[in-house]
Image (cartoon, rainbow, N blue to C red):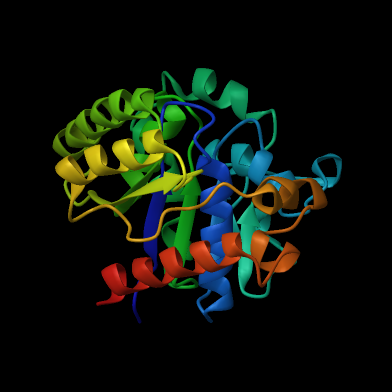
Amino acid sequence: MNKAKIICFANQKGGVGKTTSALNIAACLARSGRRVLFIDSDPQGNATSGIGIIKRDIKSSIYDLLIGRHKWNEVALKTNVKGLSIIPSSMNLVGAEIELVDEEDRQYKLKKAISGAEEEFDYIIIDCPPSLGLLTINSLAAARYVIIPVLCEYYSLEGLSQLTATIKQIKRLYNPDIELLGVLVNMFDGRLNLSIAVLEEIKKYFATKLFRTPIPRSVKISEAPSHGLAITEYDRNGKGAAAYSAVALEIIQRCEG
């Protein structure tokens, strides 16, 4: 049996559409017939509420997984997207970094905790917090691939080089198998010279890694999480859903050949 492709969405810069992209791509992969597990590794828990999980009803979360209180299948919940399950986050996760800091092999806690899930799913998508702390290191140590979401602005280019340096360090220290799967441009507006200029700049350095379809600016994409829905459920025929579906297809092509 094939093991799940584990893909981590990471960017230490906040506000780049990381969680939105991770969740919508996970939903698109599920709609393509793949079995998908989404891991919300961000203490803010935006992906958890964004897919319709009511936080106050959560009995156990990724925190319980990391400290060894529960197994992954005791924590995972079904979502409103067929084929998509989620390991939810909660504010308890803030304390996990402090609690794990003195633990042996602390950077491999997530990898060990989800090892049994790899046979049950085709894809495991991990949403990292917007930082380079222990939670992100755990995600990068567990993943086979990284996707970096960026905005069409020059500050994003600075963050991109910093993160690629971090990935190289993770590869050297903790996870020799990890590789950059792609750079995903978010909130692209083809009418703006800045968007086009930044896209061209990214192409110079990441020509083979840049996803062919940028994600457009879209009110519907922004609205969907407030309804607890992925864009594929909220605005199935809109330009946002079409763009994310195209990226999901490209991910399948890159991962499955």
Residue 9 position, x and y percent, is 43, 45
Using the image, determine if residue 249 lies above or below residue 101.
below
Q: Residue at x 48, y 71 (%)?
A: 121
> Dividing the picture into quarters, in which one does residue 199 lie?
top left
Q: Specify whether residue 88 is in view.
A: no
- Is 186 displayed left or right of 59 in the figure? left
- Quadrant containing the N terminus in the rendered view: bottom left
Foreground pick, 60 / 29: 29
Among the 4 quarters of the image, the one containing residue 96: top right
Q: Is residue 145 above or below residue 152?
A: below
**Depth check: 8 or 11 in front?**
11
Q: How many marks?
A: 0
Residue 208: x, y in percent? 18, 56
Q: Position of residue 237 (x, y in %)?
A: 66, 72
Quadrant of the frame with the C terminus? bottom left
Tell me residue 231's x, y (percent).
Answer: 66, 60
Front-most of 218 and 56? 218
Residue 92 seen in render = yes
Residue drawn where x is 41% and y is 27% of the image: 12
Towards the viewer: 8 or 137: 8
- Residue at 40% x, 29% y: name it: 153
Q: Quadrant of residue 106?
A: top left
Question: Where is 97 relative to 67, above or below?
Answer: above
